[in-house]
Structure formats: structure tokens, C-alpha cells
Amino acid sequence: MRMLVCHVGWMPKYQGGGADDEISGGGNNPVYHEIYNFKRYRGQFYGFVQPATGGNANGRAINLDRLGGPKGTESVDKVLVVWTALHPRPGVGVVVVGWYKDATVRRSMVKLPRSMDRFDQKGKRIYNNVTCRERDATLLPLSKRTLPVPRGKGLPGQCHVWFAIPGKLSQSILALIQSYA
């Protein structure tokens, strides 16, 4: 199974922000595209993770070769994308906040659909690089965001994207998903 672990800022709902849905611990990008990761639009979810540098015109791309995509492909389907964030409570650390099953992961960021035009507070377009059907997305309630995501050798590091390898963390994530179904 292809699994991509994506680290984003912490939000209660990922519905676009607001007084009860503020982001904390986001990346160094002043436009937090991930604020819409769990906002449904026409039966789809449009997620965003800050990719590593290199690969496309704006200097950022997801290495789809690591997900088994053919050389030069622009997207890979049937990927389990697991969303993680730093819990705002001190000492808790990074935890799983949700997932997209059978997602499509794009090499490069693309603008949200024109009919969905979303802009941040500064009027800049919002981008995405991961999509899935509504029925394949799960955002855990705050009380269920308890599975820790450790850091270290063979585990997620400083990059916002980790290409999961078989091991204890991957097994724990799969067990959480299966138990939650």
C-alpha cells in the first residue's frame, strides 16, 4: 500500500479558519493552504501539504517516484494520505489528525477549482496537491487525536512529507484507521 504522511498546521476543523478554527503550528508559508483540507466541495476534498524543494517552476514538488509513479507523471492515484499536526497541548507532540483513503497526489500544487475560488485574507489564491472523494476522508474528532507520530531515523523528520515505509509507525496508523472504520 502506498502511504504518504503529510505534516500540516493544527486546526480543530480545517474548514477555512475563523474564531473556532484557527491554525497553529503551520509551516513557514504565510498562506496556509491546508486550512481547507477537510472542507467538502462537490463530493471532494482538496488537501494541501507543503512539498519539498525542487522539481517544478515554483521550486516545490512531491517526488511521485517514491510513491511508485512512472517517471515524469504528474499524479499518482490510490494513495493513503495521513495528515499529522503538532498538538497544541505542550508535551503531546505530533499526532495523526485524519486521512484520505484512495487519494490522488499531485507532483505540483494546483489552484482549487475555479468555481471553488477561495482566497486567503490577503487575496491570494489557495492551492492543493492532494484530492479524494468525500467518502474516503476522515478528520478525527479532537478527543481521538491521540496516536503519536515519533521522529527519528526511518521516521518522519523535518520535511512536511514522509513516504511511509513498512514498520511499527505504519502498522500503528493502519490499525487506527481500521479500528476507526
Image (spheres, grey):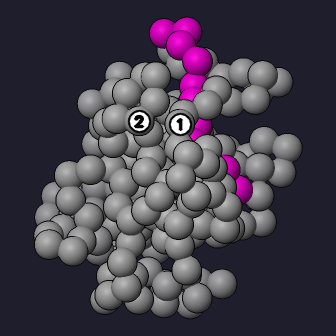
Q: Are marks 1 and 2 in contact (CB under 8 Å)?
A: yes
Give the extent of the magenta segment. 122-132
Q: Position of residue 73 (x, y in %)?
A: 60, 48
User: What residue appears at the point 39 percent right and 42 percent down from the top-left corner?
Assistant: 51
Q: Is residue 31 visible?
A: no
Q: Earlier in the sequence, mark 1 or mark 2?
A: 2
| Of the pair 143 and 56, the residue shown nearer to us | 56
Q: Please check the rendered image and state whether residue 24 is part of the magenta-colored stretch, yes or no.
A: no
Q: Is residue 151 visible?
A: yes
User: What residue appears at the point 59 percent right and 66 percent down from the top-left corner?
Assistant: 79
Residue 55 numbered mark, or none: 2
Considering the numbered disc 1 on the image, is that residue within a helix, a strand or a loop? strand
- Is residue 20 shown above or below 57? below
Most distant residue in the top direction: 123
Considering the numbered disc 2 on the image, is that residue within a helix, a strand or a loop? loop
Q: Quadrant of residue 162?
A: bottom left
Q: Identify the residue position indicated by label 1 in the image.
A: 108
